[in-house]
Image: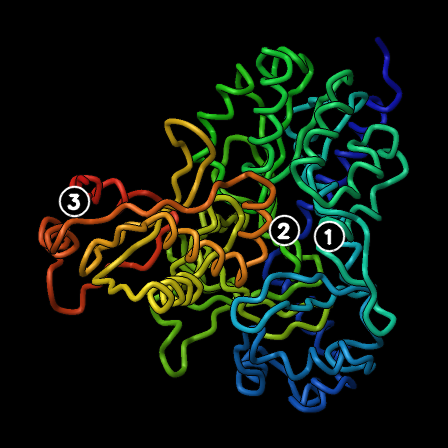
Amino acid sequence: MFSLKAALVKPFAKRVHKSVQKWAMNPIETQEKVFFELIKKAEKTTFGKDHDFGTIKSHEDFVNRVPIRDYEALKPYVEKVVAGEENVLWKGKPLYFAKTSGTTSGAKYIPITKESMPFHVEAARNAILMYVAETGNTAFVDGKMIFLQGSPILDEKNGIQLGRLSGIVAHYVPKYLQKNRMPSWETNCIEDWETKVEAIVEETLPEDMTIISGIPSWVQMYFERIIEKTGKKVGEVFPNFNLFIFGGVNYEPYRTKFENLIGRKVDSIELYPASEGFFAYQDKQGEKGMLLLLDSGIFYEFVKADEFFDENPKRLTLKDVEIGVNYVMLISTNAGLWAYNIGDTVQFTSIKPYRVIVSGRIKHFISAFGEHVIGKEVEYALNEAMDAHQIEVTEFTVAPQINPTAGLPYHEWFVEFEKLPANLEEIASKIDLALQNQNSYYYDLIVGKVLKPLVIRPIKKNGFQDYMKSIGKLGGQNKIPRLSNDRKIADALEEFILVK
């Protein structure tokens, strides 16, 4: 059957592909242009004046005047913006604040400006159009597309709207997608995740779903509810479903499970979005890595991860990066972030064009489900339980259990106690609540029943020492990581679990 929409998409995709190739094949010149535009436009801001932007003529000048900052270091400027001041980090006021979970002092307010907002939307659109340009597949354009995301209801702070990034972006869905887009606005506004998923299942079951998009852990829950409701694989329920779009966490641990839930393989597109900017998307089905977006109002710098905590780590631009090296990625943006460390580490898989994979965080973390739990949070949570229950812990480490034999996934805590307590479940509950109180992402996953509360596995006396000895790392400077985003250590510790 002839489809006007499909007929129009292909030439549009070709135009976008040509435009992308233009800057992707001229990466150094493109980034230099972005750099000088950013400096010029922010020259009269408070930040620009404080850092002598008017005298910056090179990247070397920028490095000498603008130190690397994370959110805590940038916070004095952000607080001025939040208070309603203009021309602080970027000209005027932001359009929005993307409110995210803070790791040290509560909520973080990431500015999104009139200049930066269009790139969040354009990048998601272009990812799909690049897929069309490569594959010629337009079978999905007349079907329904689901985007599992946060509520689009926004709050306001001193005249600036704020909410989660996915909720903000929901306000920018193009008109030509409005009829195809699901869930409905009313369903998308449901705050309780479990109720929301049930409503999404009811809405989508009768529809011809062709694209499904979201963080894998959320989508998995949706798929499982579909199967519970129908007794059929997702691919049977939606025979024209042929494109899965994801971002936020590593998909590989989920791939086999997803193919089983769907009942067949489907094409996928990986995205690298964040509140601070949309950094990359998969531009080729057969290539490893995502195309780094060089013409989107973001200037990138890279510091080798193993040098990052040196006193004066060398800040590299694109022309100096190498394939396979772990880099901390720094960004300067048209939302007013400058030499900003978002905490991610990346590796380049290609430099013609520049493609990256997200290799982790500069510090140990767990984000198998999008929770972004860091070492400081697990240590604090455990200390809360130790104080409350008068227990002593010799050693511990935490890992995600993505594929349990039964029930929901969870965080698995391997703990060696000085003396095994009788009330392990109470202790686990105390730790879990303390973690929820610190980390809103983890809280959402527990409340939304994507995860069940953590499980403690007691390790036998000297079990951690025996483990370190078994891998030749006993003593010296060798330490057990407090948490890991994979199960390499967890699986090895299975033999050291105390049998009660």
Instruction: Please indicate whether residue 120 sits to the left or right of residue 393 in the image.
Output: right
Q: Which quadrant of the rendered structure holds the N terminus?
A: top right
Instruction: Please indicate whether residue 474 sits to the left or right of residue 264 in the image.
Output: left
Cβ atoms at labels 2 and 3 below 8 Å apart: no
* Residue found at the far front of this picture: 422
Vertical placement of residue 203 versus 233, above or below: below
Q: Nearer the viewer, mark 3 or mark 1?
A: 3
Q: Nearer the viewer, mark 2 or mark 3?
A: 3
Viewer-side residue, 426 vs 492: 426
Residue depicted at x 73% and y 31%: 146
Vertical placement of residue 373 versus 183, above or below: below
Q: How far apart, in angstroms, are the residues tagged by discs 1 and 2?
A: 8 Å
| Spot occupied by residue 449 in the image (x, y as percentages of width and height) | 56, 39
Tell me the tag on residue 496: 3
Res. 39 image quadrant: bottom right
Instruction: Please indicate whether residue 189 sits to the left or right of residue 227 in the image.
Output: right
Q: Secondary structure at mark 3?
A: helix
Q: How far apart, in angstroms, are the residues tagged by discs 3 and 1?
A: 47 Å
Q: Which residue is mark 2?
A: 273
Res. 486 image quadrant: top left
Residue depicted at x 84% and y 48%: 171
Q: Inspect the image, locate mark 3, and give the three-letter code of the amino acid beneath it.
A: Phe
Identify the mark nearer the N-term, 1 or 2: 1
Instruction: Please indicate whether residue 270 sits to the left or right of residue 6 in the image.
Output: left
Identify the mark nearer the N-term, 3 or 1: 1
| Spot occupied by residue 178 in the image (x, y as percentages of width and height) | 87, 34
Tell me the tag on residue 120: 1
Q: Inspect the image, locate mark 1, and give the three-letter code of the amino acid beneath it.
A: His
Res. 162 image quadrant: bottom right
Q: Inspect the image, locate mark 2, and give the three-letter code of the amino acid beneath it.
A: Pro
Crowd rating for badge 1 (residues with CA inside 10 Å; few <14, some 14–19, many 20+): many
